[in-house]
Every structure is written in C-alpha cells, then in structure tokens.
Image (tube, rainbow, N blue to C red):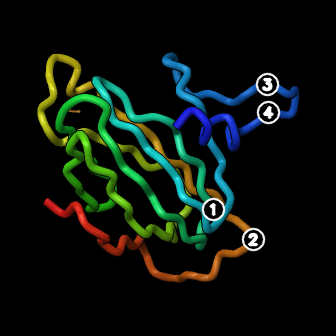
Amino acid sequence: MNEFIADYQAVASDGTLVTDGPTRIPVVEPPPGSDIYLEAAMWYWRPVLRLQRGAEYTLHLSSLDLNHGFSLYPLNINFQVVPGYDYGLRVTPDEAGEFHIICNEFCGIGHHTMVGKVIVVDGTSAESDSESASVADAGGDR
Ligand code: CUA
C-alpha cells in the first residue's frame, strides 16, 4: 500500500504531494489499466483514488482490522470487506465526479465518520456511455 501511494500520489503544481481533508489522506492517481488499492481501517479509507473516466482498473479492497462495509455513493455498490481477504474487483468508472465511500458495517465508535472518497475525472480514453459505474464482481459479494 505504501509503495502504491509512493508511486502514484498526485503532485500539485508547486511540487507538493496532494492530500485530502483534515486527515490528509493521500490522493493517488494510478494509470489506466493498473491495479489499485484501497485500505479500510478504523476509521478511514485510504488513499483517495483519482481515476479516469472510461478506464478499467482492478480494485483491491482490504481491511487492516475488522469487518467494514464498502458502499459507493451515490451508486448502489456494496461489498463486505473482511480482514485477511483481498477482493479484486474490475471497475470502469463511467461517470465523472466525486463519490463518497461509506462504511455500511458497524465497526465501533468511529463507524459513522468512516467516509472516503473516489474522484473520477475525464480522461483521454473515455469510451463508455452508460449512466453509472459498472463493477464486475470477482468475488467478495456479501
Ligand atoms: Cu468501518 Cu463501519
């Protein structure tokens, strides 16, 4: 995970590494077609993923501690994230915008604050035209 962030963290025009929010979660811009990683733990999702619309990625979801639930709003995409498993999901974002990741599995006192973010930007390879992100399940459906 730290290697993934180190390789692809977004860099601002002044050369600083881009982070998001008061908790300074790193913002990562992985190349289209790559494996991308999202870590769940009490009580955050890390990193913030900035993806290109129309590009395909393999999303690896993992939990560092206990069960969390991945919900992508406003899209109706839900997965349970159980520690010890690596879920590989093929994702092709086809709508630009900011999406929030909500935890839908009670995980303690900070559960309701466990909100992450996915940013989808218009890329050069946009070719899909449907209304919402599509996810082909490669395992991990609850
Ligand atoms: Cu993580 Cu609730």
Q: Local crowd at mark 4 within 10 Å, few (<14), some, or many (≥20)?
A: few
Q: Residue furthest front?
A: 84
Q: CA distance from mark 1 to mark 4?
A: 17 Å
Q: CA distance from mark 2 to mark 3?
A: 25 Å
- The answer to whether residue 86 is above or below residue 16 is below
Q: Position of residue 20 (x, y in %)?
A: 57, 28
Q: 10 or 120: nearer the eye?
A: 10
- Say what secondary structure mark 3 lies in: loop
Q: 113 or 79: nearer the eye?
A: 79
**What is the quadrant of residue 106 in the picture?**
top left
* Mark 1 or 2, nearer chain start: 1
Number of marks in the rendered image: 4
User: Ligand 1: does it lie within 8 Å of the C-beta at label 4?
Assistant: no
The residue pinned by badge 3 equals 16
Q: Are marks 3 and 4 in contact (CB under 8 Å)?
A: yes
* Mark 1 or 3, nearer chain start: 3
**What is the quadrant of residue 117 in the picture?**
top left
Q: Position of residue 21 (x, y in %)?
A: 53, 24
Q: Are marks 1 and 2 in contact (CB under 8 Å)?
A: yes
Identify residue type, mark 1: Gln
* Mark 4 or 2, nearer chain start: 4
Q: Residue at x 60, y 62 (%)?
A: 34
Q: Which mark is residue 124?
A: 2
Identify residue type, mark 3: Thr
The residue pinned by badge 1 equals 52
Q: Local crowd at mark 1 within 10 Å, few (<14), some, or many (≥20)?
A: many
- Say what secondary structure mark 1 lies in: strand
Identify residue type, mark 2: Thr
Q: CA distance from mark 1 to mark 3?
A: 21 Å
- Say what secondary structure mark 4 lies in: loop
